[in-house]
């Protein structure tokens, strides 16, 4: 229920019932232009509630927005609206919004994978025994599709010339996550796929640019590591496991979400764009672009095309250097052709090894 009134020293006064936490007092919004007003302790700036930006943070959604300032402590009421559906209040105790690194942030761990939501926030000052001040609720965030899988971590790099190396799972891996075993060596020789893993890419380059990219995957079990012979000999190999974790609430078994993995090689150049775009065959898929060289510098994204860089590493595991890059993007619609990002390298150009794959 709302009433509008003209009050000396107040530009707008809107009494509201039920905004913010439960209270026996009426709720109202106001903007004060008079320093002598009895409500000056509740002046809020800016006068428009900032819009929320939702982002994935591990297995949950992190909500961020610019803070609202006032002489008194400002609290926030956050709502999540299912597109075409109901509205719920989120970010309640003990996960209330807090200011961190210049932004207000809280976590929504109850959003369902495959659902699309918008978010709003309402800044207010709750004064015991008084009627709290608030701004009108913010406009809605952009619609946010909750992914089934999201990047969690790239495990430790195991650089070795050995014939039997133990590669640990990333910290925080849970049963049911997608694990990618990625190995790049300076020798054109294919490793043997470990038991329980599924080969995705086994691609090499001979001659002076001799190198090899090997990628396999599996659904995480109760294990904590895998043993691999990278067949690298004295040239050495750089190997690690990358974890794409299942979003909270996702009970579906992960699968490859493309009919074919795109992979190949390309001649030396400072930049490279994979020539074939991967096509997803399932909705809400994460597309992963992987690059490798036997160069001495880490690759980077020159043109992202919506991909986020997750890994860029260079090492010297044996007699030569190798580098690896990994980036990903989430794709909503099945059958989408995902435009490849452009990768770049500095220093002496080396031949490229590449692969693109999708999961959901």
Image (spheres, rainbow, N blue to C red):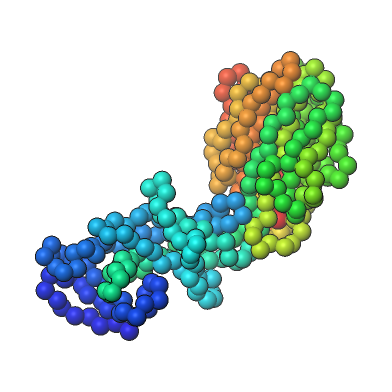
Q: Quadrant of residue 193?
A: top right
Q: Nearer the viewer, residue 208 or 194?
A: 194
Let me know if residue 289 appears in the view.
no
Left or right: residue 233 versus residue 336 is: right
Q: Nearer the viewer, residue 85 or 36?
A: 36
Quarter placement of the N terminus: bottom left
Q: Quadrant of residue 192?
A: top right
Q: Residue 285 in the image: x percent, y percent?
A: 67, 55
Count every numbered label the image shows and give the total: 0
Q: Residue 259 in the image: x percent, y percent?
A: 78, 52
Q: Residue 101 in the image: x percent, y percent?
A: 41, 46
Left or right: residue 344 versus residue 137 is: right
Quarter placement of the C terminus: bottom right
Let me know if residue 245 appears in the view.
yes
Left or right: residue 104 versus residue 163 is: left
The residue depicted at 64 percent of the width and 43 percent of the height is: 153
Is residue 300 positioned above or below 76 on the image? above
Q: Quadrant of residue 322?
A: top right
The residue depicted at 74 percent of the width and 18 percent of the height is: 318
The residue depicted at 42 percent of the width and 55 percent of the height is: 98
Q: Nearer the viewer, residue 15 or 259?
A: 15
The residue depicted at 75 percent of the width and 53 percent of the height is: 175
Q: Residue 31 in the image: x percent, y percent?
A: 22, 67
């Amino acid at each position: 229920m709302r009433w509008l009134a003209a009050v000396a020293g107040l530009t707008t006064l809107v009494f509201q019932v039920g905004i913010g936490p439960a209270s026996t007092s009426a709720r109202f919004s106001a903007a004060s232009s008079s320093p002598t007003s009895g409500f000056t302790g509740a002046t809020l700036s800016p006068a428009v509630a900032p819009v929320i930006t939702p982002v994935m943070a591990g297995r949950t959604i992190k909500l961020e927005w610019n803070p609202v300032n006032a002489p008194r402590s400002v609290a926030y009421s956050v709502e999540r609206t299912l597109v075409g559906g109901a509205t719920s209040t989120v970010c309640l105790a003990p996960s209330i919004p807090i200011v961190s690194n210049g932004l207000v942030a809280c976590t929504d761990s109850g959003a369902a994978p495959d659902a699309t939501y918008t978010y709003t926030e309402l800044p207010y000052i709750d004064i015991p025994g008084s009627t709290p001040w608030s701004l009108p609720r913010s406009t809605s965030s952009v619609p946010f599709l909750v992914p089934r899988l999201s990047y969690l971590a790239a495990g430790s790099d195991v650089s070795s010339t050995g014939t039997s190396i133990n590669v640990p799972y990333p910290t925080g891996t849970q049963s049911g996550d997608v694990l990618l075993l990625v190995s790049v060596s300076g020798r054109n020789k294919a490793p043997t796929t470990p038991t329980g893993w599924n080969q995705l890419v086994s691609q090499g380059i001979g001659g002076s640019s001799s190198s090899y990219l090997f990628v396999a995957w599996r659904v995480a079990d109760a294990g904590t590591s895998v043993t691999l012979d990278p067949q690298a000999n004295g040239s050495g190999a750089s190997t690690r496991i990358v974890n794409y974790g299942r979003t909270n609430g996702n009970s579906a078994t992960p699968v490859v979400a493309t009919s074919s993995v795109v992979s190949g090689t390309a001649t030396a150049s400072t930049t490279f764009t994979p020539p074939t775009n991967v096509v997803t065959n399932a909705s809400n898929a994460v597309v992963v672009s992987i690059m490798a060289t036997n160069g001495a510098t880490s690759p980077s994204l020159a043109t992202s095309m919506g991909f986020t860089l997750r890994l860029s590493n260079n090492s010297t595991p044996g007699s030569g250097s190798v580098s690896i890059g990994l980036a990903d993007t989430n794709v909503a619609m099945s059958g989408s052709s995902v435009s490849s990002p452009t990768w770049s390298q500095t220093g002496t150009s080396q031949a490229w090894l590449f692969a693109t794959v999708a999961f959901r």
